[in-house]
Image (cartoon, helix red, strand yellow):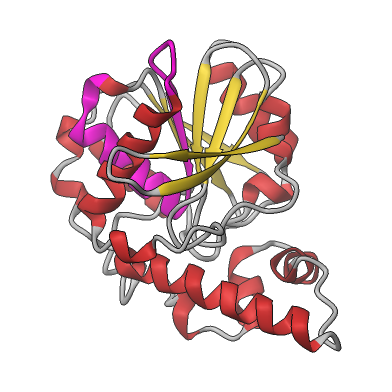
Amino acid sequence: MNERTIETRKGIGCTVREAGSGPPLVFFHGAGGLQPEEPVLEGLAREFRVFAPEWPGYGEQESEEAIEDMLDFALHGWDVVDALGLDATPHLVGHSMGGMIAAEMACLNPGGLDRLVLVCPAGLWLDAHPIPDIFAMLPFELAEALFLDPQAGEKLLTQGLDFSDMAALQDFLVGNARRLGTAGKILFPIPNRQLAKRLYRLSAETLLVWGRQDRLIPPVYAERWQELLPASQLALVEAAGHMVPYEQPEAVREAIAKFLGA
């Protein structure tokens, strides 16, 4: 995927990865950020013009101070879509935190998108099934919560970092602190910003994609999403946890492409 930098009407710089041709599809990443390889997006680029912007705090631009709360994230998302200069109404796809924001965007501006795909989204809360606090987890605990295969997950999270390289380790820790600091504005201490009260406004056709073995946001949350969005569809993906786009990329790509009519 190619990279370019755009600037929103608020003057916030944003790095965007893009590839492919066809109907526009904008992907919003989760708290872990975009990975060096994004197999689902690369696969979707065969049928769509895919755009993957980085949230403030995740790219090279030090713009995280411009985003303070959920409304800021949602409006920034629409500012990014506007700055992309698309020639058609886009599909929105969001993973985890990105799904939460994409759903909020769809509530604020129901006519601004075509279809919506939420991949194990955050945003709801069930007292009987509390979501673990990722900010209190050690690296190995985080991998166990996010991945069906924690060992493979830990390699992905550290991006093959050589822990004996102190300069690389310092860069990783600083970057990770920036990412989590930004994500914490809407996920800490619990990922509940009363989105459920606004979902009645969400009119876009919606697909929910969930890893059946998701230990962070278990599939019981998919049931709650479907209660609030009765017309939504659900694709449960086997042999995958919360990071289902990276554990079962072809199954996720296929479910999204089928739903979007590709």
Picture quarter with the C terminus: top right
Left or right: where 200 falls relative to 40: left
Count the marks: how many?
0
Residue 226 appears in view: no
Q: Looking at the image, which residue is at 66% across and 15% down?
A: 47
Percent coordinates x, y for residue 213 in the rendering: 61, 56
Instruction: Between residue 26 and residue 116, name the one nearer to us.
Output: 26
**Residue 192 sits in quarter:** bottom left
Question: In this rendering, is residue 41 above or below 124?
Answer: above
Picture quarter with the N terminus: top right
Percent coordinates x, y for residue 153 in the rendering: 73, 65
Instruction: Between residue 199 and residue 34, name the one nearer to us.
Output: 34
Q: Is residue 208 magenta?
A: no
Question: In this rendering, is residue 173 above or below 90?
Answer: below
Q: Which residues are magenta?
A: 85-111
Q: Looking at the image, which residue is at 73% across and 82% down?
A: 169
Question: In this rendering, is residue 77 above or below 127?
Answer: above
Q: Looking at the image, which residue is at 85% across and 79% down?
A: 162
Left or right: where 208 falls relative to 154: left
Percent coordinates x, y for residue 191 in the rendering: 32, 64
Q: Is residue 105 magenta?
A: yes
